[in-house]
Amino acid sequence: MRKLLIILLFIPAVLFGQYDKMLDELEDSQTETQDGKLALRFFNADNGQPVTDATIKIEGIGDFQTDMQGRVLFDIPADARYACSFSKEGFIEAIYRFEVIAGTIFNNRFMVCPILDFGSLRVVLSWNRKPADLDLHLIKQGEYHISYQDMHKSTDGTGKLDLDDRDGFGPETITIKDLDEKAVYTCYVKDYTDKDRPNSRKLSESGATVLVFGNNALLNTFEIQKDKKGTSWMVFEIVNGVVKPTLTIGNQY
């Protein structure tokens, strides 16, 4: 009976986040069909919360301020790929890109990063609603392995899992303090939902994106390849302080 009570208490907490995100999707869809407007949403990579009162400049469309939902609305433009800039005091300024196809945006959620300490690097994973659980991993060879399944914080305090997400969209965030330029780091994403299905294409279909922030700039944007089998996405290595893309999907881990 006690175990059942614990489960019943746990389920609403897990489902609430997913339900909240699904409401965002539904609201954006209704806004698009009823009001003829598209939405972009901006979230803090540190805590997953909407970022309000940020300035968003969309190429060829106009300037906007995010509302209490971290959202901007604008009239549906011609089908094309657009750039938008994000700025707010205390956050890293960055440029993001989105594509309008047949009058809609298939991925309208962007993760933004607060200002980092000198020498720090932040890795941020986001994806679509499915699979529910993708996991971000960061290995410092010979030192530590940061992820939800492994250690959440390195023993020396230089590596930390800031945020884990198990109900779709993300973000998942790992921060490295005092990047060791003599070390080798490996970053990969694991499809935990489909971990026992090595021929699954769900990871490849997830729309996963990994952002790398450092030197108070958005340094790299990595988008997952489509139509590939496997549950592990090898994203990049850091060698001699330089981020080097690997970008392969398989079952290495």
Image (tube, rainbow, N blue to C red):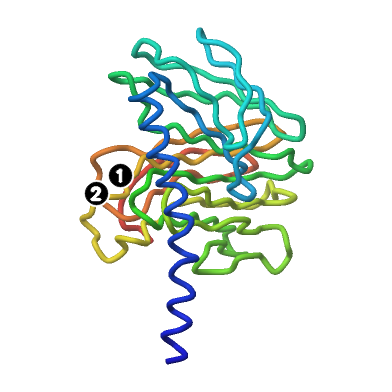
Residue bearing mark 1:
204
The numbered dot on residue 157 is none
Q: Residue furthest top?
A: 60
Residue at the image position 30 percent from the left and 52 percent from the top: 250
Residue bearing mark 2:
201
Mark 1 Cα shell of 10 Å, populated few (<14), some (14-19), many (≥20): many
Placement of 233 over or under 5, stated as above or below? above
Say which quadrant the C terminus sits in.
bottom left
Q: Are marks 1 and 2 in contact (CB under 8 Å)?
A: yes
Coordinates of residue 41 in the picture (x, y in percent): 52, 33
Coordinates of residue 59 in the picture (x, y in percent): 52, 12
Q: CA distance from mark 1 to mark 2?
A: 5 Å
Identify residue type, mark 1.
Ser
Coordinates of residue 30 in the picture (x, y in percent): 37, 31
Marker count (numbered): 2
Is 14 positioned to the left or the right of 158 in the image?
left
